[in-house]
Image (cartoon, rainbow, N blue to C red):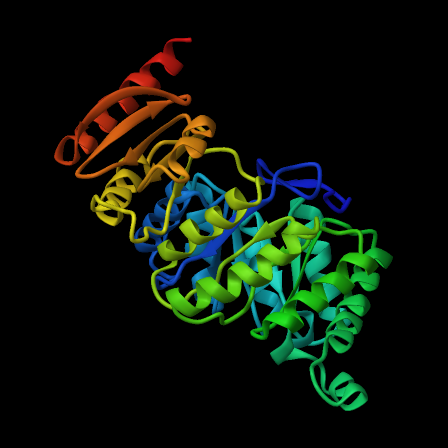
Amino acid sequence: MRRKTVSFLIRDVGMGSDYPVTVQSMTNTDSHDVVATLAQVEQLAALGAAIVRVAAPDMAAVPAVAEVARQSSVPIVADVHFDYRIAIAALEQGVDAVRINPGNIGGLEKLAAVVEAAKKADAAIRIGVNSGSVEKELLEKYGHPCPEAMVESLEKYVHFCESLGFEKLVLSVKSSDVPTMIRVNEMAAERFKYPLHLGVTEAGTVRSGTIKSSVGIGSLLAHGIGDTIRVSLTGDPANEIPVAVGILKSLGLMKAGVDIVSCPTCGRTQIDLARLAEEVETLCQTIERPLKIAVMGCVVNGPGEAKEADLGIAGGKGAGIIFRKGEIVHKCHEEELLDAFKSELENLLTEETNK
């Protein structure tokens, strides 16, 4: 069961347990360049990002980030470090939320000024505490940036915001160490009532980062913890979205789009199933309607998956069948399978549209 949290809107996107878990990402363009940054925001939105974060590294970037927020189809979170005045300016100029680490913006007095600006703008604040940014006194107390230190750091800032009557908070406690990330979010989930942003920070390249993020984020979501997620991968942020969406779909937390089941192949496989599965995935990647597609290599698991799938392929010796809702609709040679599948997919989508 999903953990119950405070819920609210960030522009028109729901945040918290009253709404679906959302996918986030962050641009890596020059934040001073409105055209390039907006283009990347829209690319990420088209792939499935519901919220996008944009770095605001200096005061000169604020007007550009605010302009991106005005033009973008999704809410924009200004990512601010070190200078609380940047966060205030971004809020005053119309961003939908700010992300701050209170430990590096100069103390509670400056946090209070950011909170006041967020109140006036009816905007949200994401408070972030990473293992690499725990305050010196807490490191001395605990000896290292352990989950207890991170949660104690977060607790101070949450209670301070509450004392100011501000609860439009999203909390983020991240680590590049997966067990630490899991444990600290479990502790935060027990202690706080606010939405949690999940992510393994600095997870790495597409390959290693996908593994770490899937384990860390997926473990928590499977136990009802987490309200918005970001898969942090080195390089093009467009690579993050399919992984994040895949995590949600694998846990049944996102119903849109195609779920493809394909067997790993073995010595019984007598068609080029790997190529076929890749081609089917490419055909289906822009479909938003929830469908289950199966691409199976032999008769061991093929018939069983066929009964559960909306549409699929089961291979034989240089040939195969196309099944729909568990019924065989085509038998053809291997080289004809993809065209037959494509035709049946188009028919299925057309019929669903006309219902």
Q: Which residue is outermost to the top?
A: 355
Residue 284 image offset from top left, x and y in percent: 32, 35
Q: Quadrant of the C terminus?
A: top left
State whether residue 21 appears in this view: yes
The quadrant in which residue 327 appears is top left
Q: What residue sits 47% from the left and 55% below the top?
A: 25
Depth check: give the residue in front, 4 or 338. Answer: 338
Task: Examine the rendered structure and indicate whether residue 6 appears above or below residue 161.
Answer: above
Q: What residue sits 80% from the left and 51% below the top?
A: 193
The quadrant in which residue 7 appears is top right
The mark total stands at: 0
Depth check: give the residue in front, 299 or 295. Answer: 299
> Position of 169 compared to 347: left or right?
right
Depth check: give the residue in front, 153 or 251. Answer: 251
> Position of 74 compared to 155: left or right?
left
Residue 262 image offset from top left, x and y in percent: 37, 43
Residue 70 image offset from top left, x and y in percent: 46, 43
> Position of 54 compared to 317: left or right?
right
Q: Quadrant of the N terminus?
A: top right
Depth check: give the residue in front, 108 or 249. Answer: 249
> Position of 196 compared to 12: left or right?
right
Task: Examine the rendered structure and indicate whether residue 5 appears above or below residue 135.
Answer: above
Q: What residue sits 42% from the left and 65% below the top?
A: 233
Task: Examine the rendered structure and indicate whether residue 81 appears above or below residue 336.
Answer: below
Residue 13 image offset from top left, x and y in percent: 58, 38
Q: Which residue is outermost to the right?
A: 163
Task: Examine the rendered structure and indicate whether residue 36 appears above or below residue 206.
Answer: above
State whether residue 94 appears in this view: no
